[in-house]
């Protein structure tokens, strides 16, 4: 008789293992085991049946040859199959190749060879389905004392796709400026901290362009904040169009924008981007037949020439921007 790994959940292993062994050996064989008397066994079987039939979690048992020997209805239905049709099939028959090769197979092998529970979370995609699902997945090794090896894996999975998508939306909203739909100050701060922590001051160079609109207050005063907001949105799109794909633009606040040149920053690169921005913003913004003209002042700072801390670089770029504005 098999004994379960002591580090994993005895209850969850027992739930599935009783179902498997009932299917393989019949109730009579189990009733002769010195685990519980017949009444207790029947009572526990009813409980386990109720758990497996009604739980939203996904349960399966895969033998050491990676063939399904048990599949709960919830598991089969989630992947668009009938439970019986999956018996003696492989996970490779269910999952799209990249999901199977990159996620399922490596973790199954790890569980089999280590004899330890494996927990991971991943987007998974079944065959014949364009929708991915995000699952919390646990593999529990079924260790046989008789054979002194892992003879199978109990699979327990929970679908948390809705929560993951909600989490992604919250993260995006927390890091995105609602008006212009570009990264906000929080995102920029985190990115600058990341760059400064990972940068090598001897070889890496990144730069900040601090941009402030000229004449924007007059636009708000004359046309109102609704038009001003539309101007800010268009400015953001024009700036975004003039930077490299690997660079970042963020709204810093009000009519201030910061451009982060993330790699290979040099005076040549900075001046080229600066000139493209001047040209883009100098083109009139049209609203209700009116041409609205604004300007832009830009200050720059380069890591590590002008500082190695994000705040120092922002202060330097901001000071240069105001000097340009007042000159």
Image (cartoon, rainbow, N blue to C red):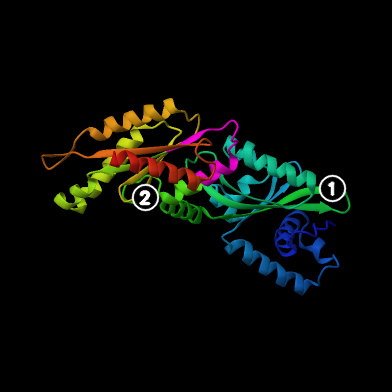
Inspect this view and state whether residue 183 appears: yes
Q: Nearer the viewer, residue 161 or 66?
A: 161
Q: Residue at x 87, y 49 (%)?
A: 148
- Residue under label 1, please give it: 149
Quarter of the image holding residue 236? top left
| Most distant residue in the bottom direction | 39
Q: CA distance from mark 2 to mark 1?
A: 55 Å
Question: Considering only order in the chain, which callout, 1 or 2, is on the residue closer to the N terminus?
Answer: 1
Q: Compare residues 7 and 299 and report the one nearer the observer.
A: 299
What residue sits right under mark 2 in the picture? 177
Q: Nearer the viewer, residue 228 or 68?
A: 228
Residue 295 is a magenta residue: no
Q: What residue is at 67 percent from the left and 69 percent from the top?
A: 46
Viewer-nearest residue: 4 or 233: 233
What is the number of callouts on the image?
A: 2
Foreground tag (2 vs 1): 2
Q: Secondary structure at mark 2?
A: loop
| Residue at the (30%, 47%) spot, across then down | 255
Q: Residues within 10 Å of mark 1 (few under 14, many from 20)?
A: some
For the view shown, which residue lies furthest in the left direction?
289
Boundaries of the magenta span: 191-208
Q: Measuring from the top left, give residue 10's x and y in whole percent.
A: 75, 63
């Amino acid at each position: 008789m098999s004994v379960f790994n002591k580090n994993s959940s005895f209850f969850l292993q027992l739930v599935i293992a009783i179902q498997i062994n009932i299917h393989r050996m019949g109730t009579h064989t189990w009733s002769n085991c010195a685990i519980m008397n017949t009444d207790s066994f029947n009572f526990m079987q009813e409980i386990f049946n109720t758990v497996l039939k009604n739980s939203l979690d996904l349960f399966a048992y895969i033998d050491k040859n990676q063939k399904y020997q048990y599949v709960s209805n919830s598991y089969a239905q989630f992947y668009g199959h009938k439970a019986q049709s999956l018996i003696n099939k492989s996970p490779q028959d269910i999952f799209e190749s990249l999901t199977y090769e990159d996620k399922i197979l490596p973790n199954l092998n790890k569980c089999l060879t280590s004899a330890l529970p494996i927990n991971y979370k991943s987007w998974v995609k079944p065959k014949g389905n364009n929708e991915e699902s995000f699952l919390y997945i646990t593999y529990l090794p079924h260790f046989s004392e008789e054979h002194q090896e892992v003879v199978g894996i109990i699979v327990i999975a929970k679908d948390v796709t809705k929560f993951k998508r909600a989490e992604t939306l919250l993260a995006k909203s927390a890091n995105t400026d609602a008006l212009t739909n570009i990264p906000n100050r929080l995102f920029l701060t985190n990115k600058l901290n990341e760059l400064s922590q990972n940068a090598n001051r001897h070889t890496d160079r990144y730069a900040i362009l601090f941009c402030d609109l000229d004449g924007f207050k007059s636009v708000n005063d004359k046309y109102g904040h609704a038009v001003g907001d539309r101007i800010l949105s268009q400015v953001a799109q024009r700036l975004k169009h003039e930077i490299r794909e690997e660079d970042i633009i963020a709204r810093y606040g009000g009519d201030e924008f910061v451009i982060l040149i993330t790699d290979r920053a040099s005076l040549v690169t900075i001046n080229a981007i600066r000139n493209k921005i001047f040209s883009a913003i100098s083109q009139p913004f049209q609203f209700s037949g009116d041409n609205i003209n604004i300007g832009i002042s830009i200050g720059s700072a380069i890591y590590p020439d002008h500082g190695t801390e994000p705040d120092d670089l922002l202060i330097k770029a901001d000071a240069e921007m105001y000097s340009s504005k007042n000159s």
